Image: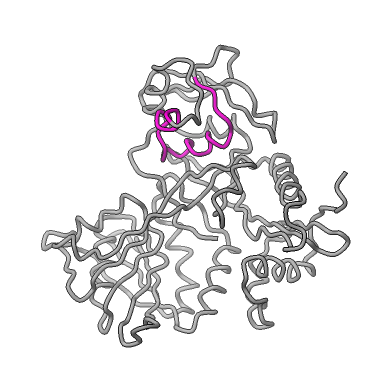
Amino acid sequence: MSDFEIRTLRTDEHRAASDLFRDTVHVRPATDAEWARSGLTYQPGGAIGAFDPELIGTARFFDAELTVPGGARVPMAGVTGVGVRADRTRRGVLRALMAAQLEEFAARGVVCANLLASEAGIYGRFGYGLATRIRTYTVDRARARLRPDAPVGGEIELLDADRAWERLPGVYDRIGRRPGTMSRPEVLWRLYEAQCRRREQPMKAVVHHGPDGLDGFATYFVEGMQAHPWTKSLEVPDLFAATPAAFAGLWRFLLGVDLVDRVVAEERPLDEPIELLLDDHRRLLENRIGDEHWIRLVDVPKALGAREYGPGEPVVVEVVDPQLPANNGTYRISPDGAERVDAPAALRLDVTTLGMLYLGFWRPSALAGVGRIEVRDPAAAVAADVLFGTRTVPWSGSHF
């Protein structure tokens, strides 16, 4: 039996949980002024804590919806703020917190959970699989130009921070979704606002007015580089565009901001066509690839039934889930959907690997080739590539 208790935190315990989490990632506690905003990022009833008898670990979540291949949205829980006090790590506290969260998600009807991992080796143990990746790239603003045949149309409107926080949620909600994007509840927008207002430089934002209304936005900061303070970097943490014209229009504006040497676009989709938009693709100075969201399927039958599949031959897969045994079983995947069946499986995989496949980023045959999927019928892996594949690389674009 564990020597600590896990329970839902009261609202008056949220700040202590925040301080504990910030300490685990080596960040100072929030000041009173900062907490006035940061406290709004906690969903009521969404935080749990481990006590012995004082608080030694915490985790929290917020409710949202995830867009899956085919355009359907499923209930998801965004997991964040996970930390264990330094003197109580490696004693089962994290495992107990994760187990308690999963049990609550299952009881509440959550289809999947979603998180960004501080370390890649942690969350696969609890069924989370890396489902999307991102790139951060730098463009030489002084010499980069859009191609003369780049899409045109629409107008750009500049917003200060106060007006941006009022208008951006509505613009985001209007923009079409690709697999992996998620709804942004109020607590998430409040998180972004709190993070931005902590920065020394003010945030600015632009929105793009297309023929049918607002169809894109970008937020940005202009920062001096530490080694070269007169070299200015325009950092873009958030950019969404519903159309090629909106994407080109936003970049036309960003590359036209004076007294800036480079534009850094953070956490962008891997297939974003910035190189094709520039008249010289070598004005792209840096391109770093990183991890984005890890997906944990809480309700495998509902998750598999919600997404669309490609025109491949049907495949029966066996799913193994040690934490949530209700997910164990065999499922027939076909272009018509997914259903539980009592039939021999051609592929066998754990729920972590299924989370990696779910949005279409990884090919089943590639995962089979490195031993993450047990192949009982060689033709099934190729068929699964077609079934799980997507025309668009999945991406979220929402950090939490």
Q: Nearer the viewer, residue 113 or 373?
A: 373
**Which residue is depicted at the point 40% across and 54% down?**
134
Q: Nearer the viewer, residue 364 or 306?
A: 364
Give the colour scheme shown.
Answer: one colour
In which quadrant will I find the N terminus?
top right
Quarter of the rendering containing residue 41: bottom right
- Image x and y of residue 66, in percent: 52, 46
Q: Residue furthest bottom?
A: 230
- Image x and y of residue 88, in percent: 77, 59
Q: Is residue 355 left or right of residue 158?
A: right
Quarter of the rendering containing residue 217: bottom left
**Which residue is depicted at the point 66% across and 58% down?**
82
Tally the marks. Answer: 0
Q: Is residue 305 left or right of residue 88?
A: left
In which quadrant will I find the C terminus?
bottom right
- Image x and y of residue 316, in percent: 50, 18
- Image x and y of residue 139, in percent: 26, 68
Q: Nearer the viewer, residue 96 or 371?
A: 371
**Please, is residue 376 above or below residue 229 in the view?**
above
118 drawn magenta: no
Q: Nearer the viewer, residue 375 or 334?
A: 375
**Please, is residue 354 above or below residue 337 in the view?**
below
**Which residue is depicted at the point 70% across and 47% down?**
98
363 drawn magenta: yes
Q: Residue furthest left?
A: 148
**Please, is residue 122 above or below residue 373 in the view?**
below
Q: Main secondary structure of the magenta part?
A: helix
**Which residue is depicted at the point 41% across and 40% down?**
361
Q: Is residue 226 left or right of residue 287?
A: right
Residue stretch rendered in magenta on the structure: 347-369
